[in-house]
Amino acid sequence: MSYEYLFSPISIKGLYFKNRIVMPPMATNFGIVTDQSIAYYSKRALGGVGSIIIEGTPAHLFRNKNFQERLKLLADSIHKSGANVFVQLTIRSNPQPRKDVTEIPIDEIESYIEDFVYAGKVCLEAGFDGVEPHGAHGFIMNQFFSPIFNRRNDDYGGDVYRRMRFALDVIRGLKSVANDRFLILYRHTPVEWKDGGYSLEDTILFARELKKEGLDILDVSPSTAPGSYDYGALAREVKKQVGIPVIMVGKMYVPDLADSKIREGYADFVAIGRTLLSDPFLPKKIQDGRFDLINSCRQCNIKCHGYLRRRIPISCVVNPSVGREFLERGSWSRELR
């Protein structure tokens, strides 16, 4: 198969994407702007992925001058290797233990928004193609949208529209510092699979408001869905009802399936995660029909997610070069032969 849809180009707001494959944000414990991290991401860009979303990075870090200087090295290296690059932005960890976002004071919420906007400006100046606030997987931004975790009775909690205000304020602020080619993405879990949680209908309302604020791409990440659920159906419904470009997440490492989802209009992009750990050159090998050379992921989670839980740098059972890319740059070209 040629996988013509998976490898078809697309442009959004003037930004050219050479294909529809996105490397999603995955934590590494490498540090964001270290030589180790820059080489790790650059190798996957060289391997043919169209876009990379750098792992979740606390927005307050972008105020550090040394961090800002290293960011440019990261963006430049990935661009030179052939991929677009975005940064996922997260909220800084608060040392005070809280049950949920109900207890966060207004002035702290405002400081979070300021951090996001400042980080967006820094990323634009460093040469990135955009940023992605992390509003999924039960993290703080996602909790603001959740009726389970958000029991506020002010402007940031209550009905579905007030529960989406925090995210809308962040997107509005980011758009205020963006230029035409600097895209704003947002990662969102489309259904809260718990009693009393938000529904897909709530997400549709939310996505429409995000679109009004100028959101460019919605990253639909149903990480908490039941294992047998059709992840693609959620992305397709958002795309159909809202008319916004979407990234589809979940089990897209099978190229026939990924290509068909693009062809059938489920999504505009597909995210491929752990399989890019086991084989950074997966996209090129698929496009060239060299399936016998693919180093397949076992889905074991031992040295990727497992190492994260132990708070040590990730690796991969079938690809021990993960995390050692900065020591092995000279050998990268041999993997393409």
Image (cartoon, rainbow, N blue to C red):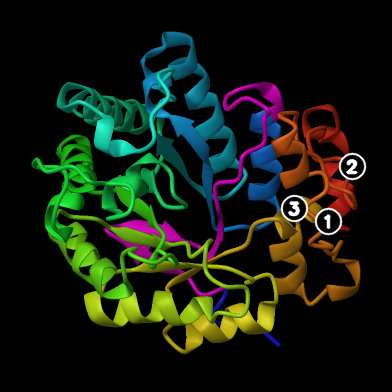
Between 161 and 59, the one nearer to me in the picture? 161
Q: Amino acid at mark 1?
A: Leu
Name the residue beneath numbered marker 2: 320
> SS class of the residue under badge 2?
loop
Between 52 and 30, the one nearer to me in the picture? 30
> Relative to residue 269, is residue 106 depicted above or below?
above
Instruction: Name the N-terminal-most of marks 3 and 1.
Output: 3
- Assign the N terminus to one quadrant of the image: bottom right
> SS class of the residue under badge 1?
helix
Alpha carbons under labels 2 and 3: distance apart:
12 Å
Task: Say whether residue 316 is visible.
Answer: yes
Q: Please name the residue shown 65% across and 58% down the image.
A: 48
Name the residue beneath numbered marker 1: 336
Give the magenta part as a residue range.
7-36
Q: Please name the residue shown 57% across and 27% down the image.
A: 32
| Left/right of residue 4 with respect to residue 184 in the rendered view | right
